[in-house]
Amino acid sequence: MPMQGLVLPLESVGKGDVASVGGKNASLGEMLSELGRGGIHVPSGFATTAEAYRRLLRENGLEQPIRDALEQYRIGKANLRETGGRVRSLVLNAAFPPELEHGIRTAYERLCKAAGQRNLAVAVRSSATAEDLAEASFAGQQESFLNVRGLDALLDACRRCYASLFTDRAITYRELKGFDHLDVALSIGIQRMVRSDKAGSGVIFTLDPDSGFPRVVVISAAWGLGEMVVKGAVDPDRLTLFKPLLEADGAVPIIGRSLGAKERKMVLGRSGERTRIVATSGRERRSFVLTDEEALQLARWAATIERHYGRPMDIEWAKDGLTGELFILQARPETVHSTAEGGSFDIYRLKGKGPVLVSGAAVGQGIVSGPAAIVRTPADAEQLAAGSVLVAEATDPDWVPALRHAGGIVTDHGGTTSHAAIVSRELGIPAVIGTGNATRLLRNGQEVTLSCASGERGLVYAGALPFTRETLNVGSLPEPPVDVMVNIADPGGAFRWWRLPAKGVGLARMEFIISALIRLHPMAAAHPERLTATERRRVEQLSAGHASPADYFVDRLARGIATLAAPYHPHPAIVRLSDFKTNEYAGLLGGAAFEEAEENPMLGFRGASRYYSDRYRDGFALECRALRQVREELGFTNVIVMVPFCRSPAEADRVLAEMAKHGLQRGENGLQVYVMCEIPSNVILADEFARRFDGFSIGSNDLTQLVLGVDRDSALLAELFDERDEAVMRMVTDTIAGAHRGGIKVGICGQAPSNSPEFARFLIARGIDSISLNPDSFVTTVKALSRMNPPASARPAPNRTRAARSGRHGLSAGGPSARVGATRAR
């Protein structure tokens, strides 16, 4: 039932009052009254009601003229721009009902008195009665006005808010969503200004806005007032925090942290200006807006708000630069992933190659091809041909009428939490945001392919490339007869697979994180003084914002590992230490100074042999620092360390001693250490290796290569490379038996089970404890495996008594989580 009165204190309304004060104000009141006691800060204020808006229309006789104007647009006798302008003019010229004007004046004076200021600066925000609903966000469709001072200015801002109910973008959006225009009323929220112009502000999602992964909080942050982030006019910082560890003792679970360009900011204006946009300083561009402690505080508030509403939320926040306080400014339901079907998801794959023209942040996970259309203004976009890839400096809610015709969107500026990104997701349009230079590098009519299918970075390729779209249905997968894990290499794409019912990550390759995210040779990070002057300059640019190149390397590696470990936490995430070959290492920045050419890198200075060598020891120390940070600072004790290409038990002892020297002592804090079983000596001496490690991981690719004497990279010998060869299968059988004889688990995550369900069935029949698959083959392989049951006699129980005596500890998850294993997928 609508509440009585035309003006109400925000703390007197709640989430059940959407019909009276709109979604935005109802949510603000709910947080003030219900969550304020829990420490969440919300600026005080008041709201006009929907009845106030309707009375303004009635007393000025506007209802029928508005309906007539909109009908002319609907039947094609007037265009959108003419219609919107005509209706807004009607509202702007309307007189306030005396009771409404009196109510606004009284409430504003009360707010000024409480603040001890005569003309208190306030924010004036629109709150439509159909806004912030579960099925439609209406994000940014109506206007907001900041730094409004004095009663006359406040009344003018309120009148403009009412008129903004009929902006071109708002009319278009209601048409798309099927809302009757006059069924939607407008409430106005008036709150005291948070002086974020002297600090920063931004947006929070309580899930990953692109994949829908529900166990993270994603924060965007920029300097100054939040309009720049919301409207996509600035490239913000982005921080990702893991919700399950937000309250863990001593943990700071920031698993993603990227520094935005933040070249401009909005501040309060002078000489009659409400706001103005200025350039940020070099120091501001190089610095994160939020400290770790502030990010944690915001993430905890966001998780509390999500629990209170019982659904994922889209939140705006600000920091007052005068007091240092953090505030929540808005909270609305997330409307894309929270309403999607959870049992299936689409996977896009590029089937061709082309030059990459530009790249930026990916919005969505799709692929689209079409002609590029460089558009400078929303008005110019009205003639956009359907299916074109819209290219603009920035997109904001004014572009909504054009976005519905676009096949894809590319912008120079903006972030993944802007209103434009939200609307793009609602409309199902993939976008590449914040490329920096798309409007300069792309040409009108140029055929391009926009891909958001490779993780956090979206790419725009030259030409129309072929691609496929596959729908994976995981809702009805049967229970497999063995633990099935996944191989994940790229942190940028880790969250897209969270729906798979995997029992952990069987292989996370450290070298992929180094090559894709860090791009710096570990020894170059440890010893930049050995590089050329040109290389040192590049390293300085790469590591900007960190105290040293070594700190940059450790921080990026740690957060990359944590991102891979997050989707299936608390199940294990098996992280393999770096296993580059010398020619691969040499290709990293600074690598030439530390690598020597080898005739056969595949059998050369790789894997375990590097870690205790003076040629790489300092680089290995950085790897160990990163792993300690993952487990001890970020809180991911589910991470298991795996040693690759370990040639002998004596080498295993040296590696374990080197790890212990850097604080990674096997058995301490539940640390488990696995070894790749990929060399014949690992199989022959299985009992010796089992005494030194907590698990085996069969590396079928290298094991096949070394058993058959076939170079796995040789096209000439490709027909001879077969994991199903009798000799290889005997080796695998002996490995499984040896592991169980030694009381440890054994798994496999090489390519063979992903390629051949028949090979996977063989492994289960021999008693393998776990199989790790490539994500894209997970569904089909699990279905195939579920049609068989492993013979009980083929799976001898490990000697748990010996394992317990040796000091091995299970993971914090306990139980089934300990039944793991992995292999390489190279």
Image: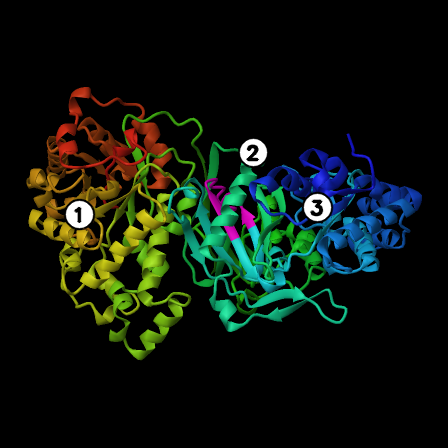
Q: Identify the residue at image location x=14%, y=31%.
A: 740
Q: Is residue 681 visible?
A: yes
Question: Residue 764 sits in which quadrant?
Answer: top left
Front label number (2 vs 3): 2
Query: Residue tagged by mark 2?
Result: 310
Query: Residue tagged by mark 3?
Result: 173
Is 617 drawn above or below residue 538 in the view shown?
A: above
Q: Amino acid at mark 3?
A: Tyr
Mark 2 Cα shell of 10 Å, populated few (<14), some (14-19), many (≥20): few
> Who is closer to the viewer here, 810 or 259?
810
Query: Residue tagged by mark 1?
Result: 702
Question: Residue 81 sits in which quadrant?
Answer: bottom right
Q: Identify the residue at image location x=56%, y=58%.
A: 324
**Distance between mark 2 and mark 3 Cα atoms:** 26 Å
Q: Is residue 293 left or right of residue 776?
A: right
**Distance between mark 3 and mark 1 Cα atoms:** 56 Å
Question: Residue 703 sits in which quadrant?
Answer: top left
Q: Is residue 56 left or right of residue 201?
A: right
The location of residue 511, given as percent across then percent down, is 28, 55
> Who is closer to the viewer here, 686 or 30?
30
> Who is closer to the viewer here, 744 or 241?
241
